[in-house]
Amino acid sequence: MKIAFVGKGGSGKTTLASLFTAYLAGAGKPVLAIDADINQHLAVALGASEEEAIAWPTLGDNMGLIKEYLRGDNPRIADAASMIKTTPPGRGSRLVRPFEDNPIFQACFREFGGVRLGVTGQFDEDDLGVACYHSKVGAAELLLNHMIDDTGEYVVMDMTAGADAFASGLFTRFDVTFLVCEPTVRSVGVYRQYADYARDFGVRLVVVGNKVTEDEDIDFLRDEIGDALLGWMENSRHVRAAERGRARPIGELEAHNLGTLGSMLATVDAEQRDWARYQRQGVEFHLRNARAWGSGRAGEDLTAQVDPEFVLGPEPAKQSA
């Protein structure tokens, strides 16, 4: 299952993404995590030191490798340079599984605390004024477009804050999107914006309250969110200790908060992916991007990269040319 964490900046999105990731790992479940937030804090939230986080290899710095590997011998793609973030797989493309060994995972991912972790990369000084952060996140989007995750495997992504995820088709790549919502009008406003954007695409949007301190907070979230509210996280000494650099085992998290993580996992496990729709939406957003800017930039018609006879899926017959 592919899972995204979104929400207003400062809502605790990265904290909750790290807690859920640690909860999966603590239960012995295979989990691959990707930090796709412009503020790269997921590694530290999982317990890495600042020095370890800074030294982490990045997907953004390995875009050439990612494109060349995923392209394979797909005859519809002239060369790696003609691939854009939305380029869908077709016959001849290389597909990846989240826990296999391949050049992309060797270059871009590291094991930490039972988690296979990758980061898109920080927005550095050379990017200022000449690039947008989508140039970093595009590497993760391309990887997800070519990734086959199977039953009992979990891919967790910490997304950029606010509604920025809707700037590409990345928001359709997930089976469940958890929106982290504080008991505030502004945070609820971000939820409503997400819900409006996601409604026409079948996105499974589930709200988890955060920073709840009293019954009035719960009442407010219930009144404003309704049935989309799955549960909430109460203020946590466990989290505060981690924020001071003293990470504790996930089993020491407060009982209520552990229960919320358990409800989140049950929600994820109850989902079943429609591979045909997954592929169709990927193609749809590639065609939009190709027509809007991709073909003009590449100097060729990138809509021709779509293989109409290919459907991404776990069956070997659908993966081969």
Image: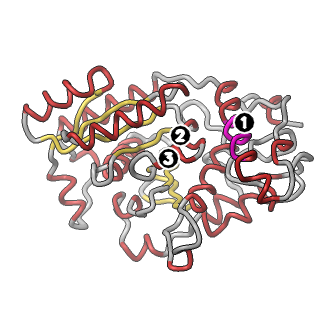
Residue 29: image x %, image y %?
A: 46, 40
> Can you tell which mark lies on residue 165?
3
Is 103 placed left or right of 204 in the picture? right
Closest to the observer: 182 or 199?
A: 199
For residue 41, which numbered disc appears in the image?
none
- Give amino acid for label 1: Val
The earlier-in-sequence mark between 1 and 2 is: 2
Q: CB atoms at circles 3 and 1 under 8 Å apart?
A: no
Frontmost residue, 268 versus 274: 274
Instruction: Determine the secondary structure under disc 2.
Output: helix
- Up the image or down, 192 lies above or below 136; here it is above
Q: Residue at x 90, y 55 (%)?
A: 78
Q: Which residues are magenta?
A: 282-289
Is residue 54 something that shows in the picture? yes
Would you call the spot at circle 3 few (<14 residues within 10 Å), some (14-19), or many (20 or more)? some
Mark identifier at residue 171:
2
Colouring convention used in this rendered image of the protein: secondary structure
